[in-house]
Amino acid sequence: MGTAPIFANAPIVGTGIVPATLDTSLTAPTNQTTLTFSTAIGSSGAKIEQVDVIGLGTTVAGVLNTFLYDGSTYHLFDQWLISAVTSSTTAVAFRASRQYPNLIIPSSWSFRITNTIAGNQSLLEVNAYGANF
């Protein structure tokens, strides 16, 4: 066990668009999108501080699932309730943000998202903000 504390030091941003194919599985999704990080998750892992879900147009009510994937097993991390929003030049698109004080992703793991409702295919973007250790 190390005696010196480790701190997050190199900022990273992960992005992904929800998949076009629906998937309601909470244990073994087959249609998911892996967030692509601006810099690979470091050898000591990464800490994600905030995740945003942003509508890219008109959304319908549904659920977005987020998973941590260890290379063989999906671990349901969080679920987002998506509201029906008709965006226009006078109405803003759907947006939700959550902060996570304890979201640590090991170096060999990934952060993945699935879409559970028809109508939101490719219309939601997920962004994660954090730093490598």
Image (cartoon, rainbow, N blue to C red):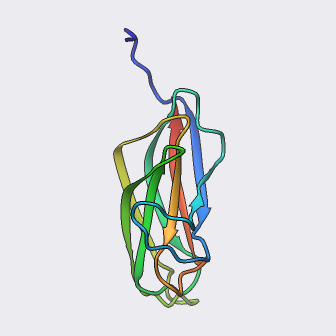
Vertical comparison of 120 with 40: above or below: below
The residue depicted at 48 percent of the width and 67 percent of the height is 53
Vertical comparison of 62 with 8: above or below: below
Q: How many marks?
A: 0
The residue depicted at 58 percent of the width and 42 percent of the height is 12
The residue depicted at 36 percent of the width and 48 percent of the height is 100
User: Residue 72: image x %, image y %?
Assistant: 51, 46
The residue depicted at 56 percent of the width and 37 percent of the height is 108
User: Residue 85's image quarter?
Assistant: bottom left
User: Residue 92: image x %, image y %?
Assistant: 50, 82
Residue 35 left/right relative to 114: right
Which residue is most to the left? 101
Return the residue nearer the eye: 111 or 10.
111
User: Residue 11: image x %, image y %?
Assistant: 57, 38
Residue 82 left/right relative to 112: left
User: Residue 26: image x %, image y %?
Assistant: 39, 64
Vertical comparison of 81 with 90: above or below: above
Vertical comparison of 46 with 68: above or below: above
Q: Quadrant of the N terminus?
A: top left
Which residue is most to the top? 3
